[in-house]
Amino acid sequence: MSTDLRDATDQRITRLRATLTTEFEAQTARLTELTADTGDPGEAHTQAAMIAATRQSLAQISDALRRMAEGGYGICERCAVPIPTERLEVLPHARFCVPCQQKQG
């Protein structure tokens, strides 16, 4: 890999890591707010759903950050081809390329 291409890849990963870290912090703050007792039993079901969705988002972000640390970030977990940069910029925690994601259902 040429130095220019390696530098561009490193910059992209750094930018995506910053995006994921910022999102992780935001989702952590949201989870803290959601888990605070509101005292309104009528909102319990909705609050539980939002907590579950926030925890899922945190797990996806954590997994993406782990893949970055281990060197497997940006590689489809199903077919092992690089995930297009455009997809990662839209969905930084993507585990699959679009064709494989469609097969996942």
Image: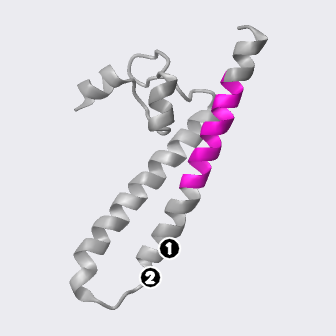
Calculate the distance from the C-alpha at mark 1 to the C-alpha at mark 2.
Answer: 6 Å
The outermost residue toward the bottom is: 39
x 46%, y 17%: residue: 80
Amino acid type, residue under disc 2 in the picture: Ala
Q: Residues within 10 Å of mark 1 (few under 14, many from 20)?
A: few
Q: Is residue 52 left or right of residue 21?
A: left
Q: Quadrant of the N terminus?
A: top right
Which residue occupies 34% across, 62% down?
A: 52
Q: Position of residue 12 (x, y in %)?
A: 64, 30
**Residue 92 coordinates in the image, percent (x, y):** 50, 38
Question: Tag 2's secondary structure?
Answer: loop
Q: Nearer the viewer, residue 16 or 72?
A: 16
Q: For residue 11: magenta?
A: yes
The answer to whether 46 is drawn above or below residue 42 in the figure is: above
Foreground pick, 78 / 49: 49
Res. 45 image quadrant: bottom left
Q: Residue at x 69, y 22 (%)?
A: 8
Question: Which image quarter is the C terminus in?
Answer: top left
Q: Amino acid at mark 1?
A: Thr
Residue range corresponding to the magenta coloring? 9-23
User: Dot 1 corresponds to which residue?
Assistant: 32
Residues at circles 1 and 2 in contact by the CB criterion of under 8 Å? yes
- Mark number for residue 49? none
Name the spot of residue 82 as percent of width and height, x first. 50, 18
Q: Which residue is mark 2?
A: 36
Q: Residue furthest top?
A: 2
Rendered residue at 44%/82% (across/down): 36
The secondary structure making up most of the magenta span is: helix
Is 100 one of the magenta-colored residues? no
